[in-house]
Image: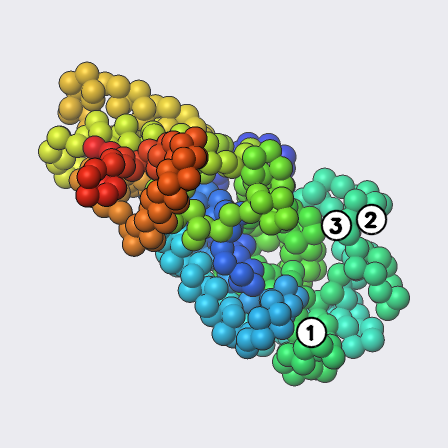
Amino acid sequence: MLLKLFNTLSGKKEIFKPISENNIKMYVCGPTVYDKAHIGNARPAVVFDVLYRILKYIYPKVTYVRNITDIDDKIYQAAIKKNVAIHELTGKNTKEYHEDISKLNVLAVDIEPKATEHIPDIIQFIEKLIENGNAYLADNHVYFDVSSFENYGKLSKKNIEELKEGARIEVSESKRNPMDFVLWKPVDEKFNFGWESPWGKGRPGWHIECSAMSSKYLGEIFDIHGGGIDLVFPHHENEIAQSCAINRRETIANYWMHNGHLNVNGTKMSKSLGSFFTVNELLEKFDGETLRMAFLMTHYASPMDFSMETLKQANNILNRWQNAIKSIEIEDSAEIAQDVLAALLDDMNTPKAIALLSETVDKINKGDIKLATVFINTCRKLLGILTKNPKDWFCSVSPEKKKWLEEKIRQRQIAKDKKDYKLADEIRSELADCGIIIEDTKNGVDWKTKL
C-alpha cells in the first residue's frame, strides 16, 4: 500500500517512505492550555487522529507524540486575570481538552509531554546552542541567532528579508538581528513565575519547547511533523533552525504536514464578532461524531469554513447512515472497503472517502445488506465515526445536550406566551436540525429523538 502525503517542506505530494517500517514516528503540536479548547484546537486533533489510524492500519507500530504547551505568556495573563495558580489553570484546561476531544473519538496519543515537565531538557538544549555559537545572551535573555543558520526560511519558502516584512517581530534593542527569537526570558515584575537556569530565573520561549521534547522522544530526525498552517512560520521554521543547528541535518522531520485555516461563517474566529466556538459548547447541541464528521467533510489541507449549517449537514449524513443499518445484524469482520482506503491513502482525501461511503449506503438501502459490515468497520477503524449503534445514536441524549434542550423548550414557551410564533418556529426548526422532535400536548411539551 502506497501512502501519499503533501509535504510542506517540498511543496508537493510525495510517496511516504518511513525511516523504519517497524516504528513510524510522528510529532504534532498540541494546544496551548490557557482556556477551553476551541474548534481551532479540535480540527488538528481530528485530522492527525485520522492519519494516526491510517498509519496504525498499515504499519506494526506508530509512536505518536502530541505535546501540551503549558508555558506561555497567554497562560500567565489568563492566570492573573482569573487570579488562579498557573498549574491549577493549565491542569483544568488540559483535563477538559482531553474530555472534549475524546467525545470526538480522538484516540489517546502514545506520548503527551508537557513543557513544564521538561525544563532540564530545554535548558540543556539551549546550552548546546550557545556552545555551538547559534545563540547568545543579552540582557538576561537568550536569543537564537538567525544569521547563524543558513537555511532559515526553507519551510515557509521565503528569504529573511521577506520574512521581516511579513512577520510580527518582537522588538528588542538587545537583539543582534530583528529576526532573532527568544529561547529563554527572565521573569517579569508582573508575574514572578519561572525556573532557575544558568541565565537566571526565567522561562523558555515557545519554539524551544517542541524541539527539546520531539528530540527526546523521537530522536534527531523522525517521520512526520504536523500542526496547523499558521504554525509554518514562525513556530515550525524556528523549530527546524534550532534543532538542525544542533543535529547538523537538513530537517528534523522528513514530512511536514499542515491542516488549513479554519474560519467561521467566512471570517476569522473572533470572540468580538461572535464567531468563536469552544468544543464544549458545541457538544451541548451536537454529538461529538457530528463535529468530527464536519471536520472530515473538508480536505485537511484546505481552508475550512465552519458554520452551524456545516454541522447540520454532518448530522444529516450520520442520521442517514445510521438509519441505513438500524435493522441489520452486523457481523465481526476486519475487512476494509478498498476504495475508501485508496482515497485515504491519497493524502487523506476524507471528502472522497465520505462520498464513497454514501454510495455504499445507497446500495445498502437498495437491499445489498452484505456491504453493511464492511461499511461500518471502515467507518469505525479508519475514520472514527459510526462508533455508536443506531439505537444509542437516535435514542440517547447526553446530560449536556439535555440541559441545552430544556432551556430551548423554555425559550420556545416564552416566545409562544408572547405570541412570537416566528421565534417559536425557529426554535422548533433548530431542535429538528439537531435530531430532536418536540410535540405540544395537553400535559406540556414532550420531545423525542428522530428515528
Compared with residue 98, is residue 321 higher up or lower down, i.e. above or below?
above
Left/right placement of residue 303 relative to residue 318 reads right
* Mark 2, residue position: 164
Distance of label 3 from label 2 (alpha carbons): 12 Å
Foreground of the two, 40 or 351: 40
Q: Residues within 10 Å of mark 2 (few under 14, many from 20)?
A: few
Distance of label 2 from label 1 (alpha carbons): 27 Å
Residue sitting at 75 percent across and 50 percent down? 152
Between disc 1 and disc 3, whose residue precedes? Answer: 1
Q: Quadrant of the C terminus?
A: top left
Left/right placement of residue 24 relative to residue 185 reads left
Q: Quadrant of residue 203?
A: bottom right
Q: Quadrant of the N terminus?
A: top left
Q: Position of residue 134 (x, y in %)?
A: 76, 64
Distance of label 1 from label 3 (alpha carbons): 21 Å
Asked whether residue 51 appears in the rendered view, the answer is no
Left/right placement of residue 445 relative to residue 56 reads left
* Mark 3, residue position: 152
Between disc 3 and disc 2, whose residue precedes? Answer: 3
The amino acid on which the numbered mark 1 sits, given as a three-letter code, is Glu
Q: Nearer the viewer, mark 3 or mark 2?
A: 2
Secondary structure under the numbered disc 2 in the rendered image: helix
Q: Nearer the viewer, mark 2 or mark 1?
A: 2
The amino acid on which the numbered mark 3 sits, given as a three-letter code, is Tyr
Foreground of the two, 324 or 211: 324
Left/right placement of residue 30 relative to residue 101 reads right
* Mark 1, residue position: 127
Secondary structure under the numbered disc 1 in the rendered image: helix
